[in-house]
């Protein structure tokens, strides 16, 4: 029976996942460890507004479990030593250099975790891949662990391992709900007893029918497939949004009527500025790398198109903005509403706001940023790597008040679908923007008539009614 858990990696997955396990399994002791002491300190902060991850519902749960059966600590080796089960939840970004650069996953953090487990674990330990990994990574982890296995039970050095794949399907912004009521829990492995132990843990709050078991490689591949299919829907609807804009069709009407076909379904058909987040692009690149590695070039080319459309959607939105502002945005004040990659998260990884802002800054526009959960420091850190620092510092500013920030602005660009952007008082805005004023609604969340009636021009993604 799993009594003590160690989770390696206290990020967007490790933190919320362990909080939910702790809530549902009060008899299990969980240590979440990380090599980044600042992150651990932030998870331990008494001021709950300073937790490193913002997720609706997270604060309520952490209050109930932190320092009761859930601990955030930098004591990595002791936590590994004491654990019956270890979740590896470390980051797996795309390699930036060397073989496979730009496509293959960088497994250095996974490998480091496996080596540390091999060194410090005692007794029998179930090692669970929670990170999203290329197919057959479990083999790498097994090989590393096997170098330190010792089977003699009477020996104090006794240590054995079994490796399971248990990919995480949570989406940021709804993570707590996804973890509490998952569509499914997938466990891949070849050791029957270990699979059952992990299954028993989940049975504390997940219905048995929702827990499915498979072999290791199916489990690893399912995670990449699920993300690729979701991203594919977004690129599909975004490609149709461009057709709507030139033909006079409306993407919301098309999406609704298309999604009502029960074989297609209504979810994930919102056109927007392209998908962001740390997962979709990385996981598709991974699939492309895998396809090419196994000489399945056509398969790789097929999935590559999803990313191409995603990049194109961002570029074309930027070009629309420049064109509507008379082809010249130098020195024009533009208010950027939203920097996180979606609403209800403070995560900015691969956010469409990044690329679009950089393109605008390269044309010397003056950007004012507003985001309810992303701090100016976070925005500066993201942008400073991409833009010449002189140009960058003089042309960007921040505001936490949409109305004062709109003063003399030529354009407002809505890039994240935060609730408060749906309730903007356009009458108030109209009086303070410079004329002619523009609103670019890349998320399709604004009531077009309420903007137009205030004599503000509007462009909305996929809205062909605005064609003329
Ligand atoms: P993250 O960057 O937020 O967190 C990873 C953490 O691991 C970091 O805090 C890092 O310091 C820590 N770490 C790295 N190496 C370590 C080591 N050797 N020892 C201890 N700590 C170490 O990443 P994330 O968003 O939580 O993603 C983690 C994994 O889960 C990735 O593989 C990702 O693809 C997958 N995933 C992410 C999401 C999501 O929505 N973010 C959803 C499903 C799956
Ligand atoms: C995704 C998967 O949904 C989740 O199952 C997996 O575990 C991790 O990757 P996440 O990236 O956190 O989750 O958020 P998601 O809701 O999938 O949104 C990803 C991006 O797609 C966001 O930029 C979002 O704005 C965009 N999106 C989503 C759309 O543009 N339209 C939609 O209809 C849905």
Image (cartoon, rainbow, N blue to C red):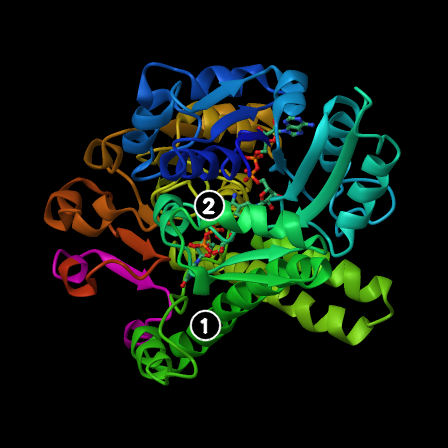
Q: State the residue position of label 1.
A: 237
Q: State the residue position of label 2.
A: 353
At 31% from the left and 40% from the top, the residue drawn is 56
Q: Quick one: label 1, few (<14), some, or many (20+) residues within 10 Å?
A: many
Quarter of the image where one finds residue 150 = top right
Q: Is residue 113 magenta?
A: no
Q: Say which element carries label 2.
A: helix
At 49% from the left and 58% from the top, the residue drawn is 274
At 64% from the left and 55% from the top, the residue drawn is 283
Q: Is 143 above or below relative to 305? A: above
**Label total for image:** 2
Q: Quick one: label 2, few (<14), some, or many (20+) residues within 10 Å?
A: many
Q: Position of residue 306 (x, y in %)?
A: 60, 67
Q: How far separated are the C-alphas under marks 1 and 2?
A: 19 Å
**Ligand 2 has an atom within 8 Å of the beta carbon of the residue at disc 2:** no
Q: Position of residue 20 (x, y in %)?
A: 40, 39
Q: Nearer the viewer, residue 255 or 73?
A: 73
Disc nearer the start of the sequence (1/2): 1
Residue extent of the magenta highlight: 451-468
Q: Say which element carries label 1.
A: helix
Q: Is 158 above or below relative to 448? A: above
Quadrant the N terminus occupies: top right
- Residue 394: mark: none
Label 1 close to label 2 by CB (< 8 Å): no
Q: Position of residue 231 (x, y in %)?
A: 53, 63
**Ligand 2 has an atom within 8 Å of the beta carbon of the residue at disc 1:** yes
Where ligand 1 lies, by quadrant?
top right
Q: Nearer the viewer, residue 279 or 325?
A: 279
Left or right, 228 with reference to 369: right
């Amino acid at each position: 029976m799993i009594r003590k858990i160690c989770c390696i990696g206290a990020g967007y997955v490790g933190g919320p996942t362990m909080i939910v396990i702790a809530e549902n399994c009060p008899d299990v002791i969980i240590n979440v460890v990380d090599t980044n002491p600042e992150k651990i300190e932030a998870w331990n902060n008494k001021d709950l507004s300073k937790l490193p991850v913002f997720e609706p519902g997270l604060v309520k749960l952490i209050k109930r479990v932190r320092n009761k059966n859930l601990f955030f600590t930098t004591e990595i080796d002791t936590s590994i030593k004491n654990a019956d089960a270890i979740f590896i939840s470390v980051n797996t970004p795309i390699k930036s250099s060397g073989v496979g650069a730009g496509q293959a996953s960088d497994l250095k953090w996974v490998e480091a975790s496996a080596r540390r487990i091999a060194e410090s674990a005692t007794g029998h330990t179930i090692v669970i891949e929670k990170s999203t990994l290329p197919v057959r990574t479990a083999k790498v982890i097994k090989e590393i662990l096997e170098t330190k296995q010792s089977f003699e039970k009477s020996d104090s050095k006794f240590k054995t391992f079994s490796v399971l794949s248990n990919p995480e399907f949570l989406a940021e912004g709804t993570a707590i709900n996804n973890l509490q009521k998952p569509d499914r829990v997938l466990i891949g492995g070849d050791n029957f007893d270990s699979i059952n132990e992990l299954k028993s843990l989940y049975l504390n709050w997940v219905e048995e029918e929702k827990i499915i078991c498979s072999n290791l490689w199916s489990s690893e591949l399912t995670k990449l497939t699920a993300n690729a299919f979701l991203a594919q829907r977004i690129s599909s609807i975004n490609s149709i949004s461009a057709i709507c804009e030139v033909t006079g069709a409306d993407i919301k009407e098309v999406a609704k009527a298309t999604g009502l076909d029960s074989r297609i379904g209504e979810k994930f058909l919102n056109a927007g500025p392209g998908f962001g987040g740390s997962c979709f692009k990385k996981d598709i690149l991974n699939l492309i790398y895998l396809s090419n590695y196994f000489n399945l070039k056509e398969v790789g080319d097929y999935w590559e198109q999803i990313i191409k459309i995603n990049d194109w959607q961002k570029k074309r939105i930027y070009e629309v903005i420049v064109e509507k502002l008379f082809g010249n945005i130098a020195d024009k004040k533009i208010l950027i509403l939203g920097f996180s990659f979606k609403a209800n998260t403070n995560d900015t990884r691969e956010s469409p706001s990044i690329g679009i802002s950089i393109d605008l800054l390269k044309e010397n526009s003056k950007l004012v940023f507003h985001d309810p959960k992303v701090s100016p420091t976070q925005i500066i850190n993201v942008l400073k790597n991409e833009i010449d620092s002189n140009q960058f510092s003089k042309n960007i500013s921040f505001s936490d008040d949409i109305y004062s920030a709109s003063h003399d602005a030529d354009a407002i660009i809505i890039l994240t679908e935060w609730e408060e952007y749906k309730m903007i008082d356009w009458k108030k805005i109209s009086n303070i923007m410079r004329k002619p004023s523009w609103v670019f609604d890349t998320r399709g969340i604004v009531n077009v008539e309420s903007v137009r009636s205030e004599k503000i021009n509007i462009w909305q993604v996929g809205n062909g009614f605005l064609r003329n």
